[in-house]
Image (cartoon, rainbow, N blue to C red):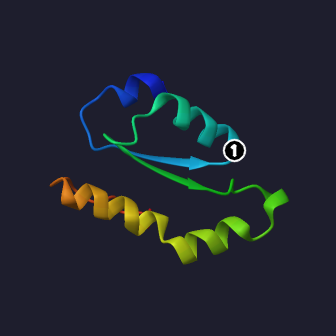
């Protein structure tokens, strides 16, 4: 699925949570064409690392910035 989506016209934002997703994206996604945002996996084993990373790195705001720059509608993350 990732390989197929990566062939679509962009920009597409790939949110990769955890090492496995990050490795797949590194192998399959052209980072010059799309945006890849890597972050901790939201697992209870990671404690509050994911929550802190979301707050500090503002990954959802960054996603909407990429979409806005491309003239695409932002995502309403509040749902």
Q: Is residue 7 left or right of residue 2?
A: left
Residue that badge 1 annotates: 19
Q: Is residue 47 above or below residue 29?
A: below
Which structural element holds mark 1? helix
Which quadrant, please, contains the C terminus? bottom left
User: Residue 23, position in %: x, y?
Assistant: 62, 37
Residue drawn at x 72%, y 68% as measured from the top left: 49
Q: Is residue 47 above or below residue 21?
A: below
Residue in front for this viewpoint, 38 or 68: 38
**Residue at far front of view:** 32
User: Residue 21, position in %: x, y?
Assistant: 62, 39
User: Residue 10, position in %: x, y?
Assistant: 26, 39
Residue drawn at x 60%, y 42% as measured from the top left: 22
Instruction: Determine which quarter of the picture holds residue 46.
Output: bottom right
Q: Is residue 45 above or below residue 22?
A: below
Q: Is residue 63 left or right of residue 49?
A: left
């Amino acid at each position: 699925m990732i390989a197929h989506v990566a062939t679509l016209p962009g920009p597409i934002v790939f949110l990769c949570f955890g090492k496995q997703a990050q490795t797949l994206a590194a192998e399959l996604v052209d980072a010059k064409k799309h945006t890849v945002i890597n972050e901790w996996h939201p697992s209870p084993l990671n404690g509050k690392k994911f929550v802190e990373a979301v707050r500090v790195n503002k990954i959802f705001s960054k996603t909407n910035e990429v979409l806005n720059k491309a003239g695409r509608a932002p995502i309403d993350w509040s749902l």
